[in-house]
């Protein structure tokens, strides 16, 4: 099966592009992202995996 994204870097770049458009605050505090950002990333990855844009293996492996 061909996936739209196959690397963690591609998933993160895609998330950050969409998060900026949505107005999400992407600043790190003490080296960590805010809870809202982390939750949005998890929801985004889950949506990508369910729609078939990324593999299940990549969805489990990708981190913010």
Image (cartoon, rainbow, N blue to C red):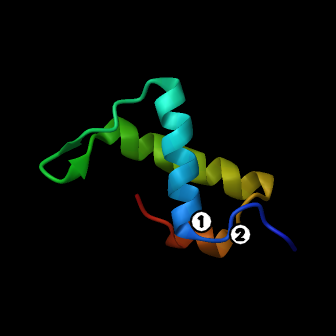
Quick one: SS at disc 1? helix
* Residue 3 x %, y %: 79, 66
* Camera-nearest residue between 21 and 48: 21
The image quadrant that residue 29 belongs to is top left
The image quadrant that residue 34 belongs to is top left
* Camera-nearest residue between 61 and 20: 20
Tell me the residue at 70%/58% (across/down): 49
Number of other residues with Cα within 10 Å of mark 1, as a class: few under 14, some 14 to 19, many 20 or more: many
Dots 2 and 1: beta carbons under 8 Å? yes
Q: Does residue 46 lie above or below 58 as drawn?
A: above
Q: Residue furthest top?
A: 23
State the mark number for residue 55: 2
Q: Is residue 36 left or right of residue 22?
A: left
* Residue 21 x %, y %: 53, 27
Q: Is residue 30 left or right of residue 44?
A: left
Q: Quadrant of the N terminus?
A: bottom right
* Camera-nearest residue between 52 and 5: 5
State the mark number for residue 27: none
Q: Does residue 14 lie above or below 7 as drawn?
A: above
Q: Residue furthest left?
A: 30
* Residue 41 x %, y %: 48, 47
Q: Is residue 4 left or right of residue 14?
A: right
* Residue 9 x %, y %: 52, 65
Residues under labels 2 and 1: Cα distance? Answer: 6 Å
Tell me the residue at 57%/58% (across/down): 11
Tell me the residue at 68%/52% (across/down): 48
* Tally of marks: 2
Tell me the residue at 63%/75% (across/down): 57
Quick one: SS at disc 2? loop
State the mark number for residue 59: 1
Number of other residues with Cα within 10 Å of mark 2, as a class: few under 14, some 14 to 19, many 20 or more: many
Q: Quadrant of the C terminus?
A: bottom left
């Amino acid at each position: 099966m061909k996936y739209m994204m196959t690397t963690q870097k591609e998933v993160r770049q895609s998330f950050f592009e969409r998060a900026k458009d949505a107005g999400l605050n992407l600043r790190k505090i003490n080296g960590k992202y805010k809870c809202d950002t982390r939750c949005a990333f998890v929801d985004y990855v889950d949506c990508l995996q369910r729609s078939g844009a990324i593999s299940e293996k990549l969805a489990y492996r990708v981190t913010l």
